[in-house]
Image: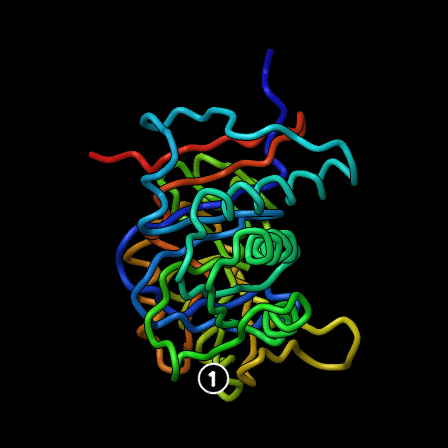
Amino acid sequence: MQRPGPFSTLYGRVLAPLPGRAGGAASGGGGNGWGVPGSHVQLLGPAQFGTRGGAGNTNTSGRDAHSVCPAPSTMSKAEEAKKLAGRAAVENHVRNNQVLGIGSGSTIVHAVQRIAERVKQENLNLVCIPTSFQARQLILQYGLTLSDLDRHPEIDLAIDGADEVDADLNLIKGGGKDSKNLGDQWHKGIPIEVIPMAYVPVSRAVTRKFGGTIELRMAINKAGPVVTDNGNFILDWKFDRVHKWSEVNTAIKMIPGVVDTGLFINMAERVYFGMQDGSVNMREKPFC
Protein backbone atom coordinates (compact mmCIF):
# COMPACT_ATOMS: atom_id res chain seq x y z
CA MET A 1 0.00 0.00 0.00
CA GLN A 2 1.29 3.44 -0.88
CA ARG A 3 2.07 5.60 2.12
CA PRO A 4 0.22 8.95 2.41
CA GLY A 5 2.19 11.90 1.14
CA PRO A 6 3.94 14.41 3.40
CA PHE A 7 2.35 17.56 4.72
CA SER A 8 5.52 18.83 6.28
CA THR A 9 9.22 18.58 5.77
CA LEU A 10 12.23 19.58 7.78
CA TYR A 11 15.69 19.61 6.37
CA GLY A 12 19.03 19.58 8.09
CA ARG A 13 22.26 21.11 6.95
CA VAL A 14 25.76 20.32 8.10
CA LEU A 15 28.72 22.69 7.75
CA ALA A 16 29.05 25.54 5.21
CA PRO A 17 28.11 29.18 5.80
CA LEU A 18 24.50 30.31 5.75
CA PRO A 19 23.72 32.75 2.96
CA GLY A 20 20.82 35.20 3.16
CA ARG A 21 17.40 33.99 2.16
CA ALA A 22 14.42 35.60 0.50
CA GLY A 23 10.72 35.02 0.36
CA GLY A 24 7.70 33.54 1.99
CA ALA A 25 7.91 34.93 5.50
CA ALA A 26 4.63 35.55 7.27
CA SER A 27 5.84 39.06 8.00
CA GLY A 28 5.59 39.89 4.31
CA GLY A 29 7.99 37.67 2.40
CA GLY A 30 11.11 39.25 3.79
CA GLY A 31 14.67 38.32 2.99
CA ASN A 32 16.41 36.61 5.85
CA GLY A 33 20.14 37.16 5.98
CA TRP A 34 22.15 34.39 7.65
CA GLY A 35 25.57 35.35 6.29
CA VAL A 36 27.28 33.48 9.09
CA PRO A 37 28.72 30.02 9.72
CA GLY A 38 26.52 27.43 11.35
CA SER A 39 23.90 24.72 10.90
CA HIS A 40 20.67 25.27 9.06
CA VAL A 41 17.38 23.69 10.04
CA GLN A 42 14.70 24.23 7.45
CA LEU A 43 10.95 23.92 7.68
CA LEU A 44 9.57 22.75 4.36
CA GLY A 45 6.05 23.48 3.34
CA PRO A 46 4.28 23.05 6.54
CA ALA A 47 7.64 22.13 8.06
CA GLN A 48 11.34 21.58 7.46
CA PHE A 49 14.45 21.54 9.57
CA GLY A 50 18.17 20.86 9.55
CA THR A 51 21.37 21.12 11.54
CA ARG A 52 25.10 20.91 11.69
CA GLY A 53 26.54 18.91 14.57
CA GLY A 54 23.16 17.62 15.72
CA ALA A 55 22.44 15.86 12.44
CA GLY A 56 24.75 13.01 13.33
CA ASN A 57 22.91 12.26 16.55
CA THR A 58 19.92 10.58 14.97
CA ASN A 59 19.93 7.02 13.68
CA THR A 60 19.72 7.03 9.88
CA SER A 61 20.82 4.80 7.05
CA GLY A 62 21.37 6.15 3.53
CA ARG A 63 18.35 7.69 1.84
CA ASP A 64 15.77 5.38 3.37
CA ALA A 65 12.91 7.17 5.07
CA HIS A 66 11.74 5.80 8.37
CA SER A 67 9.50 6.79 11.22
CA VAL A 68 11.18 8.68 14.04
CA CYS A 69 8.35 9.67 16.37
CA PRO A 70 4.68 8.94 17.12
CA ALA A 71 1.84 11.31 16.41
CA PRO A 72 -0.46 13.17 18.76
CA SER A 73 -4.11 13.15 17.76
CA THR A 74 -5.27 16.76 17.90
CA MET A 75 -5.54 19.64 15.38
CA SER A 76 -6.10 19.21 11.66
CA LYS A 77 -3.89 16.65 9.95
CA ALA A 78 -1.90 19.35 8.21
CA GLU A 79 -1.35 21.33 11.39
CA GLU A 80 -0.48 18.18 13.31
CA ALA A 81 2.11 17.29 10.67
CA LYS A 82 3.68 20.72 11.05
CA LYS A 83 3.84 20.26 14.79
CA LEU A 84 5.35 16.78 14.56
CA ALA A 85 8.06 17.76 12.11
CA GLY A 86 8.96 20.92 14.00
CA ARG A 87 9.15 19.19 17.35
CA ALA A 88 11.16 16.28 15.92
CA ALA A 89 13.79 18.67 14.58
CA VAL A 90 14.01 20.53 17.87
CA GLU A 91 14.34 17.26 19.79
CA ASN A 92 17.09 15.97 17.50
CA HIS A 93 19.19 19.07 17.04
CA VAL A 94 18.74 21.74 19.71
CA ARG A 95 21.39 21.45 22.43
CA ASN A 96 22.46 23.47 25.47
CA ASN A 97 24.57 26.62 24.95
CA GLN A 98 23.59 27.08 21.31
CA VAL A 99 22.97 30.27 19.37
CA LEU A 100 19.80 29.65 17.34
CA GLY A 101 18.63 31.44 14.21
CA ILE A 102 14.82 31.61 14.18
CA GLY A 103 13.13 31.91 10.79
CA SER A 104 9.56 32.61 9.71
CA GLY A 105 6.42 30.77 8.71
CA SER A 106 3.65 28.64 10.17
CA THR A 107 5.73 25.64 11.25
CA ILE A 108 8.31 27.74 13.02
CA VAL A 109 5.64 28.53 15.61
CA HIS A 110 5.56 24.89 16.71
CA ALA A 111 9.34 24.71 16.77
CA VAL A 112 9.62 27.81 18.95
CA GLN A 113 6.96 26.44 21.30
CA ARG A 114 8.99 23.27 21.77
CA ILE A 115 12.22 25.24 22.22
CA ALA A 116 10.55 27.25 24.98
CA GLU A 117 9.29 24.06 26.65
CA ARG A 118 12.76 22.54 26.63
CA VAL A 119 14.34 25.72 27.98
CA LYS A 120 11.95 25.56 30.94
CA GLN A 121 12.12 21.80 31.47
CA GLU A 122 15.86 21.33 30.97
CA ASN A 123 17.13 24.78 31.99
CA LEU A 124 18.83 25.17 28.60
CA ASN A 125 20.97 28.22 27.93
CA LEU A 126 19.95 29.33 24.42
CA VAL A 127 20.24 32.59 22.51
CA CYS A 128 17.82 33.29 19.64
CA ILE A 129 18.40 35.55 16.65
CA PRO A 130 15.39 36.41 14.44
CA THR A 131 15.29 36.65 10.65
CA SER A 132 12.14 38.73 10.56
CA PHE A 133 9.64 40.75 12.59
CA GLN A 134 7.47 37.64 13.02
CA ALA A 135 10.43 35.68 14.37
CA ARG A 136 11.33 38.47 16.79
CA GLN A 137 7.78 38.56 18.14
CA LEU A 138 7.75 34.78 18.62
CA ILE A 139 11.02 34.88 20.54
CA LEU A 140 9.68 37.58 22.85
CA GLN A 141 6.25 35.94 23.18
CA TYR A 142 7.77 32.70 24.46
CA GLY A 143 10.25 34.39 26.77
CA LEU A 144 13.38 33.27 24.95
CA THR A 145 16.63 35.23 24.97
CA LEU A 146 16.67 37.68 22.04
CA SER A 147 19.94 38.74 20.43
CA ASP A 148 21.34 39.87 17.08
CA LEU A 149 24.26 39.19 14.74
CA ASP A 150 26.27 42.08 16.15
CA ARG A 151 26.47 40.37 19.53
CA HIS A 152 26.44 36.79 18.22
CA PRO A 153 27.92 36.72 14.68
CA GLU A 154 28.19 32.91 14.63
CA ILE A 155 25.07 30.75 14.69
CA ASP A 156 25.11 27.11 15.76
CA LEU A 157 21.72 26.15 14.37
CA ALA A 158 19.33 28.06 12.10
CA ILE A 159 15.66 27.12 11.74
CA ASP A 160 13.74 28.44 8.76
CA GLY A 161 11.04 27.50 6.26
CA ALA A 162 10.90 26.15 2.71
CA ASP A 163 8.27 24.91 0.29
CA GLU A 164 9.65 22.02 -1.77
CA VAL A 165 12.57 19.59 -1.65
CA ASP A 166 13.94 17.62 -4.60
CA ALA A 167 15.74 14.26 -4.75
CA ASP A 168 19.09 15.93 -4.00
CA LEU A 169 17.66 17.88 -1.06
CA ASN A 170 17.79 21.21 -2.87
CA LEU A 171 14.92 23.36 -1.66
CA ILE A 172 12.69 26.25 -2.59
CA LYS A 173 12.19 28.73 0.21
CA GLY A 174 9.30 30.88 0.48
CA GLY A 175 3.70 23.71 1.47
CA GLY A 176 5.95 20.73 2.46
CA LYS A 177 6.39 18.88 -0.82
CA ASP A 178 8.68 15.97 -1.58
CA SER A 179 9.48 15.93 -5.30
CA LYS A 180 11.91 14.37 -7.74
CA ASN A 181 12.54 17.77 -9.31
CA LEU A 182 11.89 21.28 -8.05
CA GLY A 183 8.64 22.53 -9.52
CA ASP A 184 6.95 19.12 -9.79
CA GLN A 185 4.44 20.05 -7.08
CA TRP A 186 5.28 23.60 -6.01
CA HIS A 187 3.92 25.93 -8.71
CA LYS A 188 4.17 29.34 -7.07
CA GLY A 189 7.69 29.88 -8.31
CA ILE A 190 11.04 30.72 -6.78
CA PRO A 191 11.11 33.98 -4.82
CA ILE A 192 13.81 36.49 -5.71
CA GLU A 193 14.32 39.46 -3.43
CA VAL A 194 15.30 42.64 -5.30
CA ILE A 195 15.80 46.28 -4.51
CA PRO A 196 12.69 48.19 -5.67
CA MET A 197 14.32 50.19 -8.47
CA ALA A 198 15.70 46.99 -10.06
CA TYR A 199 12.63 44.77 -10.28
CA VAL A 200 11.97 45.44 -13.98
CA PRO A 201 15.54 44.89 -15.29
CA VAL A 202 15.98 41.85 -13.02
CA SER A 203 12.73 40.36 -14.31
CA ARG A 204 13.85 40.80 -17.90
CA ALA A 205 17.32 39.42 -17.24
CA VAL A 206 16.07 36.26 -15.57
CA THR A 207 13.42 35.41 -18.17
CA ARG A 208 15.73 36.25 -21.06
CA LYS A 209 18.43 33.91 -19.77
CA PHE A 210 16.42 31.12 -18.15
CA GLY A 211 12.89 31.37 -19.59
CA GLY A 212 9.66 31.11 -17.64
CA THR A 213 7.66 34.05 -16.33
CA ILE A 214 8.10 36.47 -13.44
CA GLU A 215 5.47 38.24 -11.39
CA LEU A 216 5.93 41.00 -8.84
CA ARG A 217 4.40 39.67 -5.63
CA MET A 218 1.46 41.85 -4.69
CA ALA A 219 0.20 42.47 -1.17
CA ILE A 220 -3.19 41.23 0.00
CA ASN A 221 -4.15 43.69 2.75
CA LYS A 222 -2.72 46.81 1.16
CA ALA A 223 -2.39 48.32 -2.31
CA GLY A 224 0.86 47.68 -4.12
CA PRO A 225 3.60 45.07 -3.84
CA VAL A 226 4.74 43.07 -0.84
CA VAL A 227 7.55 44.88 0.94
CA THR A 228 10.05 42.75 2.85
CA ASP A 229 11.37 43.48 6.32
CA ASN A 230 14.40 44.95 4.55
CA GLY A 231 12.32 47.29 2.38
CA ASN A 232 12.70 45.29 -0.82
CA PHE A 233 10.35 43.67 -3.37
CA ILE A 234 9.77 39.97 -4.08
CA LEU A 235 9.66 38.53 -7.60
CA ASP A 236 8.14 35.07 -8.09
CA TRP A 237 9.90 33.27 -10.96
CA LYS A 238 7.80 30.46 -12.44
CA PHE A 239 10.36 28.42 -14.36
CA ASP A 240 9.29 26.17 -17.22
CA ARG A 241 11.98 23.46 -17.16
CA VAL A 242 14.44 21.68 -14.88
CA HIS A 243 17.71 23.56 -14.46
CA LYS A 244 21.14 22.97 -13.01
CA TRP A 245 20.11 24.79 -9.88
CA SER A 246 23.53 25.56 -8.49
CA GLU A 247 24.53 27.35 -11.69
CA VAL A 248 21.20 29.14 -12.01
CA ASN A 249 21.25 30.30 -8.40
CA THR A 250 24.74 31.75 -8.74
CA ALA A 251 23.90 33.47 -12.03
CA ILE A 252 20.75 35.10 -10.65
CA LYS A 253 22.58 36.36 -7.58
CA MET A 254 25.11 38.05 -9.86
CA ILE A 255 22.42 40.20 -11.54
CA PRO A 256 22.66 43.79 -10.24
CA GLY A 257 19.78 44.56 -7.91
CA VAL A 258 19.26 41.00 -6.65
CA VAL A 259 19.51 40.67 -2.88
CA ASP A 260 19.08 36.89 -2.75
CA THR A 261 16.96 34.00 -3.98
CA GLY A 262 14.69 31.50 -2.29
CA LEU A 263 16.81 28.54 -3.38
CA PHE A 264 18.70 26.46 -0.83
CA ILE A 265 21.38 24.60 -2.79
CA ASN A 266 23.65 21.93 -1.30
CA MET A 267 22.62 22.94 2.21
CA ALA A 268 20.30 20.16 3.35
CA GLU A 269 21.63 16.83 4.53
CA ARG A 270 18.58 15.51 6.36
CA VAL A 271 14.84 15.95 5.80
CA TYR A 272 11.95 15.28 8.18
CA PHE A 273 8.55 14.60 6.63
CA GLY A 274 5.40 14.98 8.71
CA MET A 275 3.05 12.36 7.28
CA GLN A 276 -0.74 12.15 7.06
CA ASP A 277 -0.75 9.02 9.19
CA GLY A 278 0.84 10.93 12.07
CA SER A 279 4.40 9.63 11.78
CA VAL A 280 7.54 11.60 10.96
CA ASN A 281 9.86 10.18 8.30
CA MET A 282 13.47 11.11 7.74
CA ARG A 283 15.59 11.01 4.60
CA GLU A 284 19.26 11.83 4.11
CA LYS A 285 21.07 13.48 1.24
CA PRO A 286 22.57 11.01 -1.27
CA PHE A 287 26.36 11.09 -1.31
CA CYS A 288 28.41 10.14 -4.34
Picture residue at 36% right of the left edge, 35% below the top? 284
Looking at this view, name the residue that lies furthest to the left. 288
Picture residue at 63% right of the left edge, 38% below the top? 7
Picture residue at 39% right of the left edge, 82% below the top? 151
18 or 147, which lies in front?
147
Q: Which residue is mark 1?
A: 198
Residue 278 percent location from the top left of the image: 66, 29
For the question of whether residue 152 can be seen, the reply is yes
In the picture, measured across the screen, residue 245 lies left or right of residue 109, that is left
Q: Amino acid at mark 1?
A: Ala
150 or 97, which lies in front?
97
199 or 288, which lies in front?
288
Picture residue at 58% right of the left edge, 64% below the top? 104
Answer above or below: position of 242 versus 63. below
Q: Secondary structure at mark 1?
A: helix
Residue 179 percent location from the top left of the image: 49, 36
